[in-house]
Amino acid sequence: MSTMREAVTTYFRENGFGDDGGYSAKWVDFKLGPIPFPLPNSEARKKAVRFHDLNHVLTGYRTDFGGECEISAWELGAGCEEYVAAWALNLGGLAGGLWFQPLKTWRAFVAGRRSRHAAYAMNYEYALGREVQDVKDQLGITTQGKAKVGDAVLFGLASIGGVLVGGLMMVALLSPISLAMWWRGRKLQAESTPA
């Protein structure tokens, strides 16, 4: 058995996220297909992404595009507590999932609904010290579940929210201001990367 801390360290290494998962980075890449858009790594995102990474470890959803769509749907189903950045980013991820893999996205949402909580409900440091299976058991984590009528209603509402939020994100990312930030962010990343 391994602790969450050990599992997260392995997860960072296997996904090339660096020793601290990229939490200390000033800029992070938001990939729109193959095109990376560097965005400032806000404090709200830093707080939420720690728990998002724990959820990846607990559920086994991958970090590729499809896996991120699934974990977005799963987290919306399980709940993101008071982490507004997580709700917003996950709605955008759900929108991508609706477009590219609707059935997997639906199944992940239902599985989230069958889980008692996501890692957002835990104290982060406490969770890191616990065994992975203990945390799964405490949160009632599952990646499967039978759909109920209420799930369809909530998925429909989340889908509407996801399309709205995802659309706003796309407009914001492709605006002249964002494209200028993208150019500046690429330049700042290149300057801060050791040769």
Image: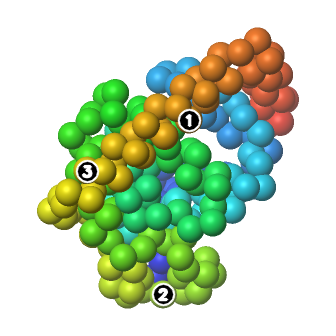
Question: Which quadrant would the C terminus be assigned to in this image?
Answer: top right
Distance from Cα at disc 3 to Cα at disc 2: 34 Å
In the image shown, does 63 or 46 lie closer to the viewer? 46
Name the amino acid type tagged 2: Arg
Looking at the picture, how far across and down is residue 137, in whole percent? Answer: 33, 84
In the image shown, does 130 or 156 lie closer to the viewer? 156
Q: Is residue 158 above or below residue 79?
A: above
Q: Which residue is mark 2?
A: 130
Tell me which numbered mark, 1 or 3, is placed earlier along the sequence. 3
Which residue: 78% across, 55% down? 43
Tell me which numbered mark, 3 or 2, is placed earlier along the sequence. 2
Which residue: 77% across, 48% down? 42
- Residue that sits furthest to the top in the current view: 176
Q: Which mark is residue 152?
A: 3
Q: Is residue 59 above or below residue 97?
A: below
Q: Give residue 143's quadrant in the image.
A: bottom left
Q: Which residue is mark 1?
A: 165
Front of the two marks 1 and 3:
3
Q: Is residue 182 left or right of residue 77?
A: right
Looking at the picture, how far across and down is residue 34, in whole percent? Answer: 49, 22
